[in-house]
Image (tube, grey):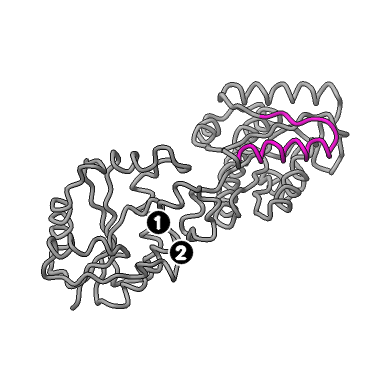
Amino acid sequence: MTVGFIGGKFLPLHLGHVYAIVHASSMVDELYVVLSHSERRDRELCESTKINYIPAQIRLRWLSKLTKDMPHVKVLSIEDNQDNEHYNWAEGAQLIKKEIGKPIDYVFSSECEYNDIFKELYPDSKHVLIDPNRTRVYISATKIRHEGVFKNWEYIPDVVKPYFIKKIVIVGTESCGKSTLVKNLAKIYNTTYAAEYGRTVCEELGGCEGIIVKEDYLQIAYGHKMEEIKAVEKANKIVFIDTEAIVTQFYSNLYNHEHQTVLDEIAKLQDYDLWLFLEPDVQWVDDGLRIHGEETARAKNNHHLKTLLKKHNIDYKNLSGNYENRLKGAIGYIEELLKE
């Protein structure tokens, strides 16, 4: 049995890493992929760059998902508390040897400069260089950190992309153009969207007025989150989401006069990058499911939803006017987000 290991910070994991891991796995009977991490050291690397610190647990998940169908590849996590300037390579090597627990035949890397240090630390192992000149995959984690993930999107593996997706949620009361705007923005940005799951449930029931019950809102909230996850997994840099748990709470209050604690808890766990709030100043359209078309009712419901958003400290951007103004306004806010 031949044993090898390849290590790194994978900050972030990119297709150069993927190629090196797969290549190395073809050369040994057992390969260990070692995530070497220190929050102190890794935060230093991300300072003054275009990506934030990525927790080791997230990077470990990436590696685990990447290699889950490679039974002879094992992923290890080795933590220390050293900084970049004073990193102790000898100590790191001892931790790796101890964790692997068997003779190491091959040490894989893409760095020629590691030759001498690896000869010293792993005298019984052969250092094998994989794509050292980046001719196979011309990318590095340093380049991604300094240029940004989106600029190097083609080098980000599919198992990694969902972590960086920007999530944009569009909220508002009945008949204010949410669904239309979400679909149009998804087309413009060539990406996915999560439709309003509450509408799906209401359509299955044949309507909402008088027949929707308290338990339906839990199905709506959970079902919607699952649709979000699916949309994020296939998204192209950004994803658009039609309503969320606070709007579901709003409808629970409106139709059933029930304020449900579980919906508040789901709302607390939400993490969106941009909230767009549509004012109800476009013509109300009766689609067979809507029942609050009077101007006084629309104004009252609009105020109620804003009150719920305020309770959750949501910082949203207002969109009003005709459909063209709403589209232009949304694109403006989205472009600001992408520049950040």
Q: Is residue 334 magenta?
A: yes
Q: Which badge, 1 or 2, is on the more N-terminal residue?
A: 1
- Reply above or below: 3 against 339: below
Compare residues 226 and 76 and report the one nearer the observer: 76
Residue at disc 2, secondary structure: loop
Give the dominant element type of the magenta stretch: helix, strand or loop: helix
Label 1 sits on residue: 62
Quarter containing the N terminus: bottom left
* Contact flag, marks 1 and 2 (Cβ < 8 Å): no
Where in the figure is residue 196, as x and y percent of width and height?
68, 45
Q: Which mark is residue 138?
A: 2
Question: Quick one: SS at disc 1?
Answer: helix
Q: CA distance from mark 1 to mark 2?
A: 21 Å
Decide: is 114 above or below 337: below
CA neighbours of label 1 inside 10 A, class few (<14), some (14 to 19), many (20+): many
Image quadrant holding the C terminus, namely top right
Return the x and y of residue 9 as percentages of the image width and height.
Answer: 32, 52
- Amino acid at pointer 1: Trp
**Can you give x and y, in whole percent of width and height, for residue 10 in the image?**
36, 54
Of 149 and 217, nearer the camera is: 149
Residue drawn at (78%, 45%), measured in percent from left and top?
180
Specify start and end residues of the magenta stretch as a single range: 317-337
Q: Please tell me which residue is depicted at 72% across the width and 21% down the height of the picture.
A: 303
Q: Residue at x 25, y 41 (%)?
A: 83
On screen, residue 40 versus residue 155, left or right, reads left
**Does residue 153 belong to the magenta stretch?**
no
Identified by mark 2, the residue type is: Tyr
Placement of 115 over or under 57, stated as above or below: below
